[in-house]
Amino acid sequence: MLDNKQCEAFFAVAEHGSFEQAGAKLCITASAVTLRVQALEKELGQLLLIRGRPCVLTQAGQQIFEHIQHIRRLEQNLLHGLTGGGESHFFKTVIGSNEDSLATWLLPALKDVLLKEKIVIELRTDDQSHTYSLLEKGTVSACISIEDQPMRGCRAQYLGLMRYQMMATAQFRRKWFSEGIHRETLRAAPAIIFNEKDRMHFDLLEKHYGLMKGTYPCHLIPSSESFVTAIKLGLGYGMVPELQMNIENKAEVLVGLLPDIRIDIPLYWHHWDQQSKPLQLLTEHIVNHARLILA
């Protein structure tokens, strides 16, 4: 029988990547966390974590981590089933999403089910190519990702395409691209990038113009709303989701710089095979709404 406190300490380290953060979450010292993890490793006769910044799971550690995840899901489902969602009991779940989905279609997709059911959500955001790792680590119960292959014990459901265009204000285009859009003008004009993980802009300029990352000026603005605001203010040009453009560009403040080039990003909804009723409802609403809204 595995010791609950030892498993709790190990899970917290795996989830947060450090003994210090695990200790803060559990309200104990990092040393106490270390002792509990070491005791669990001794009990199992296996190294579970490679110490570092962040700590990394070994193969045995990943197996234990998935086992604890499974037990937690079963307990959550059991408690919700026994209480029947009770008068004051809310089912809580954590969802991983990319910023652009959160800024456009995700909350409208969840509106009806969150108003009707006793469910509360915690949203964790990351680039769409990195949200999958949040599910792998057990940080979230489900996520929106560009990965089409589910991990073991999970399902991946296709949602649709997020379509992006290179946008700027008309004034910005006149100032920086009056002689056309080519290598030299792109070298000089300031771009707006979401963050260093966002490869879309970098890849487009490298593919079509042979410009490598670092050869042109960039603003980094890691907020979908502020990203579009910065482009509207004429601070730079960048890749904007057409869906967000439809919502925020009714006055046609922005114009397309490369109308013949669009980038389609496929999105998938990843969730565990074994879902409680509340998670099934969330999945149903997200998948159905996304397939109506996305390309």
Image (cartoon, rainbow, N blue to C red):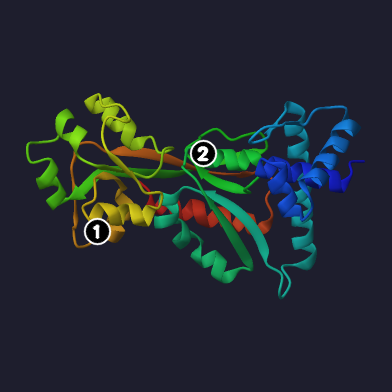
Can you give x and y, in whole percent of width and height, for residue 89 in the image? Answer: 71, 70
Q: Which image quadrant for residue 232?
A: bottom left
Give the residue type at disc 1: Asn
Q: Is residue 41 left or right of residue 86?
A: right
Q: Is residue 252 left or right of residue 133?
A: left
Residue 273 shows in this picture: no
Q: Nearer the viewer, residue 211 or 204?
A: 211
**Residue at label 1?**
249
Q: Nearer the viewer, residue 243 or 160?
A: 243
Q: Nearer the viewer, residue 126 or 276?
A: 126
Of all residues shown, which one is farthest toward the bottom? 87
Give the residue type at disc 2: His
Residue at 19 percent across and 36 percent down: it is 188
* Element at label 1: loop
Residue at 85 percent across and 32 percent down: it is 41
Pick whichever of labels 2 and 1 is earlier in the sequence. Answer: 2
* Element at label 2: loop
Residue 232 shows in this picture: yes
Determine which of the numbered discs, if any, sits on residue 130 in the image. Answer: 2
Mark 1, other Cα within 10 Å: few <14 / some 14–19 / many ≥20? some
Can you give x and y, in whole percent of width and height, for residue 228 in the image? Answer: 30, 53
State how far apart marks 2 and 1 are (Cα). 28 Å
Of all residues shown, which one is farthest toward the left? 179
Residue at 28 percent across and 26 percent down: it is 207
